[in-house]
Amino acid sequence: PCFEPAAVELLASASEGIPRTINLVARAAWIQAAKDKSLQISATHLQSALDLVPGVMDIRQNSSHP
């Protein structure tokens, strides 16, 4: 598998299951892993991707408030 288990959990949590968000974050994490010449996407790569993809953190913050 190209995603480490911790990365999958972080991706699921951060995206809240929104397909477009999953795609954007996963792609950004894949690019981060490629820069590190890594064969697997780690939670560290995913966290870096979350910082790069605009609006993802806004989605999470808005959904946590009723």
Image (tube, rainbow, N blue to C red):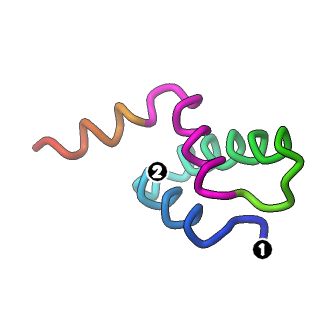
Quarter occupied by the C terminus: top left
The residue beneath circle 1 is 1
Amino acid found under the numbered disc labelled 1:
Pro
Coordinates of residue 17 in the picture (x, y in percent): 45, 58
Instruction: Look at the picture and state if 41 lies above or below 8.
Output: above
**Main SS of residues in magenta:** helix
Nearer-N-terminus badge (1/2): 1
Rendered residue at 57%/51% (across/down): 22
Q: Is residue 33 magenta?
A: no
Residue at 14% x, 41% y: name it: 65
- Tell me the quarter of the picture where residue 25 sits: top right
Q: Give the residue at x 78% y 40%.
A: 31
Q: CA distance from mark 1 to mark 2?
A: 20 Å
The residue lying toward the viewer, choosing from 19 and 48, is 48
Q: Give the residue type that dot 2 points to.
A: Ser
SS for dot 2: helix
Mark 1 surroundings within 10 Å by alpha-carbon count, few (fewer than 14), some (14 through 19), many (20 or more) = few
Pick the residue in front: 42 or 63.
42
Give the magenta-colored segment's residue range: 42-56
SS class of the residue under badge 1?
A: loop
Which residue is depicted at the point 20% across and 46% down?
64
Dot label at residue 15 = 2
| Image quadrant occupied by the N terminus | bottom right
Q: Position of residue 51 (x, y in %)?
A: 53, 32
Residue furthest out toward the left: 66
- Picture quadrant where residue 13 is located: bottom left
Q: Nearer the viewer, mark 1 or mark 2?
A: 1
- 50 lies left or right of 26: left
